[in-house]
Amino acid sequence: MELCVIEGDGIGHEVVPAAVAVLRKVLPDLQVHTAHAGWEYFQQKGAPLPQATVDMAQACGAVLFGACSSPSYPVEGYFSPIVRLRRAMQTYANLRPTRYLPVPTARAGVDLLVVRENTEDIYVGDEHTAAGGDSSTATKVITRAATERVAHRAFQIAAVAGRKKVTIVHKGNVLPQTDGLFRRVAFEVAELYPDIETDELLVDTAAYWMVKDPTRFDIVLTPNLYGDILSDMAAAWGGGLGLAPALNLGEDVAIAEPVHGSAPDIAGKGIANPTATILSAAMLVRYHWGMVKVAERIENAVEAVLSQGGHTVDIYRDDALNTQEFTTQVIANL
Ligand code: NAI
Ligand code: MG
């Protein structure tokens, strides 16, 4: 088994080694290949995502990615490395589960999965500013092909995991052509899975329900941007961003990557919560390598530590463990 490891920026340098240590423990034969991407690398070498990294990711087929910092203003030569890598590897479905974990910040009864389209929408990177600088335009792309493949993934996962309902989330009332196409194609695919209930919500109403009662949701199937936002909201119910895992899935390729970013406010302190990245690695083991028992070992070890009261500072301050201490406890519980 080959794994391409990209720490990226900020707390990526702390949480990714933690997850690699856990993986090495359960998969002693794992071959780890390190590659570079991100803002720090761009400042040193002038490239946010070097071709060597893309080549390594594609050769391995499996990637563990930390997070990359991206400024919120244009920088010549810079682009979001993860958005580019997801497209390069055609990992078209981003799975973002939220389920109750035994921490005081989590909400009992939550068990939902956001399935986010991962290759198009507003993330195609087609953004322009007119001369004078006072008018900017971004292109939103929705295609039948991309919607079909992510919708099939969502319903297939629902069937395998015994989930009952898929909620299609869109803004078709304002965007009847783009989101309208997503909605129409998603409902067409739904007809092929008659055992699974399907409903729909406009994204603003979905946000309302995500706050008011997240137990309303089972699987959420949605375009790229709404999935990004709703999965951060859902993460709050799962106990916080430090606990929220994700997996980008394509055909025989996958990128494990926590929902959170590079967290510059806490980077370098050794206090970041590695749980999200460890559970993302477990998703890679489960969905990409198909080793369900090994994935469960990792998930059970994390849950054991949390239920014994082991926690990092983002959960609560008193008696918090640092990244290293928390990881050592997870490994001890494998
Ligand atoms: P963020 O997710 O990095 O941080 C949000 C808040 O959550 C911060 O207070 C942070 O300290 C906390 N947090 C996040 N992960 C944590 C962890 N594992 N343990 C403890 N606390 C944690 O989002 P923010 O601050 O909006 O973005 C920072 C940078 O990350 C930006 O440059 C952004 O572009 C980038 N980003 C990158 C992503 C990626 O590469 N996939 C995803 C999201 C953001
Ligand atoms: Mg996000």
Image: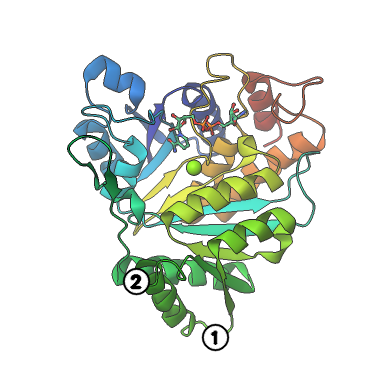
The correct choice, above or below, for 194 with respect to 4 in the image is below
Exactly how many numbered labels are in the figure?
2
Determine whether the beta carbon of the residue marked 1 sits less than 8 angstroms from the nearest atom of ligand 2. no
Depth check: give the residue in front, 138 or 289: 138
Residue 266 drawn at (x, y percent) = 58, 19
Which residue does the numbered mark 1 point to in the structure image?
194
The residue mark sitting in front, 1 or 2, is 2
Query: Separation of disc 1 and disc 2 at Cα?
Result: 26 Å
In this rendering, would 274 be left or right of 90? right
Residue at screen point 51% across, 21% down: 264
Q: Which of marks 1 and 2 is nearer the N terminus?
A: 2
Residue at screen point 49% across, 29% down: 16
In this rendering, would 219 be left or right of 120? right
| Residue at far left of view | 131
Which residue does the numbered mark 2 point to in the structure image?
177
Amino acid at circle 1 = Pro
Crowdedness of circle 2 by 10 Å Cα count: few (<14), some, many (20+)?
Answer: few
Residue at screen point 46% across, 57% down: 116
Q: Look at the numbered disc 2 and give the secondary structure of its residue.
A: loop
Instruction: Give the position of the C terminus as an image quadrant.
Output: top right
In this orientation, does residue 15 appear? yes
Amino acid at circle 2 = Gln
The correct choice, above or below, for 206 with respect to 247 in the image is below
Residue 304 drawn at (x, y percent) = 76, 39
Instruction: Give the position of the N terminus as an image quadrant.
Output: top left
Q: Do the residues labelled 1 and 2 touch (CB within 8 Å)?
A: no
The correct choice, above or below, for 101 with respect to 37 in the image is below
In this rendering, would 47 be left or right of 11? left
